[in-house]
Image: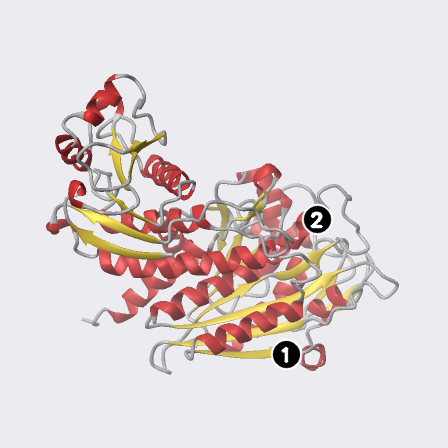
Amino acid sequence: MEFSIKLGSPEKQRSGCVVVGVFEGGKLSDAAKLLDVSARGALGKIIARGDMSGKVATTLLLHNVPNVLCERVLLVGLGEHRELSARQYIECVRAAMRALCATGAKDAVLYLTEFPLAGRDGAWCVSQVVLAAFDAAYRFDYFKSKPEKNKAPTLRIQLGIISSKKIIGQDVALKQAMAIGRGASLAKDLGNSPGNTCTPSHLAKQAMALAKLHKSLKVTVLEEGDMKKLGMGSLLSVTRGSDEPAKLITLEYKGADKQQKPVVLVGKGVTFDTGGISLKPGAEMDEMKYDMCGAASVLGALHAIAEMGLKLNVVGIIPACENMPSGSATKPGDIVTSMSGQTIEILNTDAEGRLILCDALTFAAKFKPATVIDIATLTGACVIALGHVASALYSNQDDLARELLEAGEQAHDRAWHMPLWDEYQPQLDSNFADIQNIGGRAGGSITAACFLSRFTKSYRWAHLDIAGTAWKSGKDKGATGRPVPLLTQYLINCAKAVSKPSR
C-alpha cells in the first residue's frame, strides 16, 4: 500500500473515495461540513433520515453525491463529540478501512486525523490509520489453489489535512507507521505459515533474506553442533525428538556507533509444539504452529527499524526448533545442563519454551547488551490471567518495565506489569537438580518468568509473555503481528534517548 499526506479541502479531491467522520446526534466533522456545503446539504439530509447514527465504528457508503468530485463518500461514526477515546478512535479507523477495502476504490483520501483526543496528537492518529489500513488489507492466501476473489484493497491512500498547522511531525509518523505495518505483516505471514513449511531452517532463510534486503543487517546461523560446543544442553534437549535440525539465528543491526551497547531481542522460535512426551491434547493442536510468534516479532521489529534506518544498535536472537515426541525425545524426569552451567530437571516437556530461551539468554550476554528483552508465547496461564488484550510483562528492573509499558501505550499494543517476587522462586526448587522447569499450577506465568530470571542476573532484562496476544482463535484465526508495534516503539524511544545531547 502507498500512503501520503495531502493538504486540501475534501470537496476538491478527485479519488475513488473520500472518508469523513460523523458524530452522534448528526454533528458533522469539519471535513464532513465542507463536503456537505458543496453537496448542498445532501449529507445532512441523509443523516436526518436516520441512515447514519454516528455511533462509534458505524459506516455508510454513498455513491454519486452531488457536487462532490470523488466517486464515493464514506461516512464513519465517531460517537459522542469530545468523548472519543483512543480505543474508540482505533475502532473507528479499523471500521473505515474494512469498509474501504470492501469497495472497488483504488485510491482514497481520508480525513480522520484531526479529532480531539486526550493525550494524542495528529501524528499518533496518522500512525493508527496506517496500521489499520495494513491490517484491513492483509491477506494470507499463499496456500490456496484458488485465492479468494476479494475486491482489491485500496492501494493509494492520502491522509487529508485541512489545516497546515497540524502537519508537524506527521511525515515522520507516516514513515515509521509504514515500516511497522510491513514488519507486523511479516510477523503475521510467518505465524500463519504451516509447520511443515515454517521450520527452523525456514526461519533462518527468512533472516538471511532480511539481511540481503537491508545492508544494515548481518545474520549468523549456528547449527546443532555449534550449540553443543557452546554447552546449550537445555536448548538441545527440546529438539532431540525432531528430525528437523534446530537453528540459533542471530541478526545484528548496526545503526549507531560501534561503542553503543545494543538492545537485544530474544524470540522464542518453536515452529511446532506437540508438547513432546508430555503430549498436548489433540484439539486445537494445529494452533501450535504459532509457538514461534516471539521469533516472528523479532524479525518483524528488525525489518521495521532497518527500513526506518533507526540510529540504534539492535541484536535479534532466535532459538528455533520443533518439540516432537519420538524414541529419542527428552523424557519427564531427565536432567540437562544449560549453557550457564545450571542443571535443570525437566518435569514437563511441554514447558519447553523456557528451556530454549534460557540458553539463548545466556548467549545474549556475549553482546554486552544495554538491555535484553525476550518475547515468547510461553504459558497458557498468561491467557487465563490477562486474556487476549494485554501481554504479560516481567522485568528485573522497574524502570525498564515502565519504559516498555509507555511504549505499549504509545503504540496501543499494551502490556501489564506482573510480579517477579522472590517469594515465587521456591516453587522451582528441585530435589535432584539446581532448578526444575515447572512450578505447579499456581502462578504459572509468574514461575515461568522466575525460571528465566535465573539466567538474566548480569544485565537489564524484561520478558513479554505473548501467549494471549500473538494470535486469534476461532472464526478469525490467525497471527496478530503483536508485539511488533510495542517493540518497535520501544526501540524508537531508545534511539531518541541516545540521540539527546548529554548535559
- Please give the label number shown on residue 222: 1
Near mark 1 (Cα within 10 A), the count class, few <14, some 14-19 or many ≥20, is: some
* Labels in figure, total: 2
Point out the residue furthest to the right here: 327
Secondary structure type for disc 2: helix
Please name whichever residue, 256 or 116, is drawn nearer the observer in this view of the structure. Answer: 116
At mark 1, the secondary structure is: strand
Q: Is residue 327 above or below residue 367?
A: above
The image position of residue 266, as x and y in percent, is 54, 65
Residue for point 20% across, 37% down:
68
- Placement of 314 over or under 75, stated as above or below: below
Q: Is residue 62 visible?
A: yes
Identify which residue, 65 or 458, lies in the foreground: 65
**How far apart in space, not on screen, are marks 2 and 1 (Cα)?**
28 Å
Residue 286 circle label: 2
Q: Nearer the viewer, residue 344 or 324?
A: 324
* Residue 373 visible to the viewer: no
- Closer-to-camera residue (160/12): 12
Residue 440: numbered disc: none
